[in-house]
Image (cartoon, helix red, strand yellow):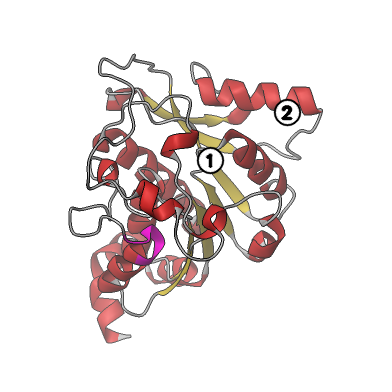
Amino acid sequence: MAIEQAIFRRTELLVGDESMERLSSKKVIIFGVGGVGSWCAESLVRSGIRHLTIVDSDRVCITNINRQLMATTKTVGQVKVEVLRERLLTINPAADITALQQIFTAETADSFNIDTYDYIIDAIDSLKDKQLLILMACRTKARFFSSMGAALKMDPTRIQVGEFWKVKGDPLARALRNKFKQTKQFPKRKFLCVFSDELLQNKGHNATCGTEMCVCPKAKMGPGNPDLLNHEWCSSKAQINGTMAHITAIFGFMLAGLVIKDAIG
């Protein structure tokens, strides 16, 4: 405990003892630890969150290096949640970090027991799975925060927080709202999103990794159930959009900030 007290001394000076106790007692789950979720996880652990579950089915691909916290030339091919867990434990060895190499889908949703968490964070890319997580999370007592699209953006000053139904200029939010209207299933309550109303165009060619260091094809043929344990996303995407680390990181930090603000408030 002495090590933890030293680690968070500067945080405790700012927020006080009671707030640190609240932070250390909260249970948080993050779905998706890519460009947004990985930075969110790091910020939460550095801020005093001790109980964190990180969920992602993917392995580190060389194209992740430009924006994902745990992605380096040394971690290419490794399971994302396992690499991230190792890093988070070097920040706070006493933290309780659960790494789940899984996908949140209609088939797996109940296995995560999301109603046992204080905070649920959505950093999922898949529209169908994101829609389901929003619907389920909004039925729980947990505080829920969601990331909208962080690709095709460069201007950090346009990143903001807003209530989902009031988000403007974000194609992902618009697609989700259309999905809810089409299925006539709506979130049971309001929730906050991190988004940007900036929308640029790709200037480069739309292509998959295109390098011998890409592990996507290998991961797809991994042991066990390939769709669940070693999912690769490149081949299933109609278009791959450009991203920048400073944008995805700010999205992640803002999600973490929402959790911290609420927990100590």
Q: Which element carries disc 2, helix, strand or loop?
A: helix
Q: How far is the residue under mark 2 from the one under mark 1?
A: 16 Å
Q: Is residue 258 above or below residue 54?
A: above
Image quadrant in which you'd find residue 23? bottom left
- Which residue is label 2 attached to? 180
Q: Residue furthest left?
A: 73
In the displayed structure, 84 sits above or below 246; it is below
Residue 28 x/y as whole percent: 52, 61
The residue positioned farthest toward the right in the image shown: 184
Q: Quadrant of the N terminus?
A: bottom left
> Looking at the picture, how far across and down is residue 233, in whole percent?
45, 41
**Mark 2 or mark 1, earlier in chain:** 1
The magenta span reads 78-82
Which amino acid lies under the numbered mark 1 shown in the image of this protein? Answer: Ser
Neighbour class for label 1 at 10 Å: few (<14), some, many (≥20)? many
Count of picture labels: 2
Task: Report the residue marked by disc 1.
Answer: 146
Q: Is residue 166 visible?
A: no
Q: Residue at (28%, 65%) from the top-left corner?
A: 13
- In the rendered image, the residue lying farthest to the bottom is 2
Where residue 128 sits in the image (x, y, percent)? 64, 36
| Residue 108, magenta (yes or no) | no
> Residue 230 in the image: x percent, y percent?
46, 56
